[in-house]
Amino acid sequence: MTVKAWNKIWILPLILFAIAAVFAVLYFDEQSEGKSLVDSEGLWKDLINRKKPTLLLLGDLFVYQEKDSTQNSLLTIQNSAIHSLEELRVFEFRNNQASIQRKPSAVAQLDFNSALWVKQLTRIFVSTDSDYSLQTVSQFDPKQLQNHDIMVIGKQKNLGIFKSYWTPSKIKYDARKDVFFYQNKEHKDPIFYQPKGNIESFHTDYGYLAKVPGPNNNNIYIFTGLRNTGTSQTLNNFTDPRLLPLMEQHLASRFGTIPEFYEVLFEVNGISQQELNSEIIHVFAIEK
């Protein structure tokens, strides 16, 4: 368990994130020369020819404030073992101290990789003359689910209600163990997929990509991983002009055509949080 504490709330990560997004728009708008970077009939088809506005949600870190009346101190804390209000309440119950009060922070804290993810997506949206709105998962109101196509990006444990949104999924997530698993009908026990190796050196992570049906004839896209390595590579496979056609070819070859809805599990290798390559472990078409 890792605990990080600040004596005041830092908004610099949000500022850097906003600047990076704006610079991405300005730069790629001038460089793309009106040429789309993706195939309008491929995996981006419904995002380009959209019927509803697109809402991009970034999985933010769960941060809370801790006020100690005996020390007269106020700390803002990000605890790697706490990712939701429910988990904070359990932590409080187990660590009850009359002098300490805890409550969720009103300011979102984003991972640095969020700026890179937004830059990648902005590049594609600008090239297709499209746009999107931006929020964090913690700011998301479930009422918005009816009126938008949703894109959710972040580590699996930071996705809020989208951690296990599509319950019929064949690739499931165990929040307690922070692992993906797959229950094969031919095997009694599920197959678990969890990160291996030191994240500061060579390591293996797992990423998950899905397009699932929303409740109002809309689409929900999920890009995630158990660590940032898996999350970033999953998004790369959807945005990189070299990797995207390979995934489109794989889906078309497997199912005869690209399914309207699908889910993919990747094994990703990386060094020091930098993704190197990925391999598709499982891919399934999803029926609406």
Image: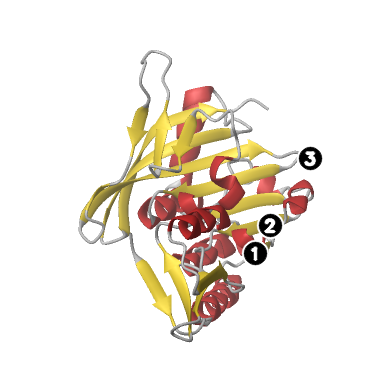
Q: Quadrant of the N terminus?
A: bottom left
Give the x, y percent position of residue 53.
75, 55
Give the x, y percent position of residue 204.
27, 47
* Residue situated in front as seen by the camera: 136 or 176: 176
Label ID, residue 135: 1
Q: Quadrant of the C terminus?
A: top right
The residue wearing badge 3 is 216
Instruction: Answer whether labels 1 and 2 touch (C-beta < 8 Å).
Output: yes
Mark 2 nearby-residue class (10 Å; few <14, some 14–19, many ≥20): many
Mark 1 nearby-residue class (10 Å; few <14, some 14–19, many ≥20): some
* Residue situated in front as seen by the camera: 219 or 165: 165
Q: Which picture quadrant has residue 193?
A: top left
* Left or right of 129 in this view: 174: left
The residue positioned 46% from the left and 57% from the top of the image is 91
- Residue type highlighted by circle 2: Leu
The residue positioned 69% from the left and 60% from the top of the image is 130
- Residue type highlighted by circle 3: Asn
Q: CA distance from mark 3 to mark 2?
A: 15 Å
* Left or right of 280 in this view: 61: right
Label ID, residue 55: 2
Work out which residue is located at the far front of the displayed protein and give it: 98
Q: Which comes sooner in the sequence, label 1 or label 2?
A: 2
